[in-house]
Each structure stands twice: as C-alpha cells, then as structure tokens.
Amino acid sequence: MNKAVIPVAGLGTRLLPATKSQPKEMLPVGRKPIVQYIVEELIRMGVEEILFITGPGKTSIENHFGVDHELIQTLREKGKEDLLAELEFDRIPAHYYYTHQRQMLGLGHAVLCARSFVGDESFIVALGDSIIGLNAGSDIVRRMQRCFDEKGCAAVIAFEEVPDNEVHQYGIAQPKTNGEFFELSDIIEKPSLNEAPGNLAVAARYVFTPRIFDALDRTGPGKGGEIQLTDAIRLLIADGEKVCGVRLNGGERRYDIGNLESYFRAFAEFALADEKHGASLREYIATLSKA
Ligand code: UTP
C-alpha cells in the first residue's frame, strides 16, 4: 500500500500545559518525537506518500520533516558527523503532504479530509499519538495488509486487549470469528464496561478502502459530539461489508501518548531501552527508589 494518512489535528488537551503551544505528536519519547516513529514505521511498511491532517499550531510537524539546509551546513562546518547522522530521517525518499482539518469535529472528520488525496486506492490510517512496539518495531501494518488482501475486506483494524478500566477509552470490537485474522460483527466507541462486548480495543492503525468515506459522509456526531471513525466502521458492517481485526502480538504494545500516565510510561520505557543511556538511567532510578 502506497498511501498513508496521519491525523495530527487534535488539541491534545489531556496533556496541557505541555501541548499549549506544541503538538502532542511532537513530544519526545526517548530520542525522537512521537510522529517520527510513526513515519519510520510506515516507510518500513513500503508507504511512499504520507498525508498529515493538521490544524492550527502544528507547523512544527511540517518543519520536522522538511530538510533544514542551514542546520546541516552548520553541523558539517563544525565536523559534527555523528549529529548529522541523526538527521538522516529527513532524507527518507517519501512524499509528505499536509492539509488542514478546518474544524475540530473528531477523528472521523479528520479522516474525511483525506478523500481527494486517497482517490480510489486503499490506504492506511496511523494515529499520530500512538507508537506500536518498542522503538516502533512492530510489523502489524504488514499483517493487516495481508489480511486485507487475503480476506477482501473493506476495513482492517489493529486491536489490543486492554484491562477493564481502560475499555471506556477506546473503540471495542465484537468479534464474529476467531483466528489470527478475525471478522467483526460490531464495534462500539468508548463503551462503558457494561456495554462493552469484550476488551479488544482499537490500536491506532487501520487499513481502508475508499468506501469508508461514503460511510463517514453518513456518520453524524457520536460520543463527545464528535464524528467518530468507529461509528463509520460500524456503518460499513451494517452495510454488509467485511470488516476484520488483527491482534497485536505478545511482543508488541501500543504506546498511547494521549494521556500523561501512558506518556510517562512510554518515555521511561524508551529511555531505559536506549543503547547509550539506558543502563546509566536504570542505575539512577535504582538510587531514587532507595531514597
Ligand atoms: P484523540 O482522540 O486523543 O483527541 O486523538 P485529541 O483531541 O488529540 O486529544 P484530547 O482528548 O484533547 O486530549 C487521536 C488522534 O486523532 C487526531 C489527534 O491529533 C490524534 O493524533 N485527531 C483527533 C484529529 O486529527 N482531529 C480531531 O478532530 C481529533
């Protein structure tokens, strides 16, 4: 699949004040901003064209993926080859596109903004605030594409089992079949524990045919008054389209950066795994826990 869409227009209010004047998708986790991990994951999956759905105050994302000739020149003149290597990601042979979501009407509305970019091709959606796997090492999107090709689905969604107390934060699947690639009979956005058909939560990666746009056209405001992507997927299922799920495997985790608790955990885990500084950080933390 050649095209991917990364919605990054959300306000990130749960991370205020850190997100008052910078996008949550640009917060660092270990060495890199979150959105860089996502782009690197997509490029590894063979994606060549990436559309960011942005909003006000998000220009630093665009700057991050642009080539900064002045900075490169300065580092070259100072002989800082090691630091130049840190900028190699901006030479990735990908095409980046940016469009504004002009009103914050929710994730479904953000995806709808990708319609003319996508045309009649199938495409990937990767949420701009979630990294999959330590250092984004997951190949979930490749498995999702395989499911998409083998099963002929209108949509494939990544899922992760979450504890009961997190069910109300995510879209929750009602599986119809078992197996590595399972079919869905329903999906419910942010249900209460009583309403939830299980604890398989949407894990921030989707593969769609353009039929999702027709479903989004017919989707009114849902939970929180927002146009929910989950509700459009539900419409696809109601239309008789095949919608499938793929589970993250044991070695994969979704690092959701949307709230402080999971952001702190993600940062700690990535920093502790850092090749150069992880070991000394571990020692430092041990001294703190003794104090
Ligand atoms: P969230 O559902 O976490 O929403 O977005 P949010 O608005 O960013 O965060 P809070 O609730 O105010 O703290 C999940 C992903 O979808 C994007 C966000 O940028 C994030 O990457 N998104 C969300 C949009 O692009 N547009 C929207 O209208 C909502």
Image (cartoon, grey):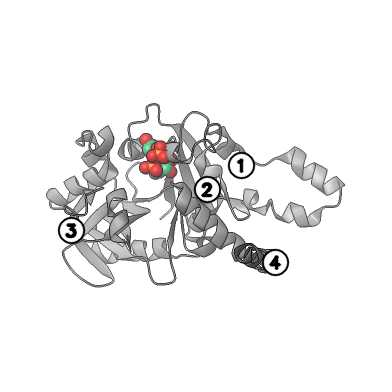
**Tag of residue 280:** 4
Compared to residue 218, the image places residue 76 above or below, namely below
Alpha-carbon span between mark 3 and mark 4: 44 Å
The answer to whether mark 2 and mark 1 are in CB contact below 8 A is yes
Task: Name which residue type carries label 3.
Answer: Pro
Residue ID for mark 1: 64
Compared to residue 29, the image places residue 288 above or below, namely below
Alpha-carbon span between mark 3 and mark 2: 31 Å
The C terminus, quarter of image: bottom right
Disc number lying in front (1 or 4): 4
Q: Residue 45, percent across and down?
A: 47, 60
Residue ID for mark 2: 35
Alpha-carbon span between mark 2 and mark 1: 9 Å
Horizontal side, residue 153 vs residue 268: left or right = left
Point out the tag, 3 or 1, that comes first from the N-terminus: 1
Other-residue count near label 4 (Cα within 10 Å), few / some / many at <14 / 14–19 / ≥20: few
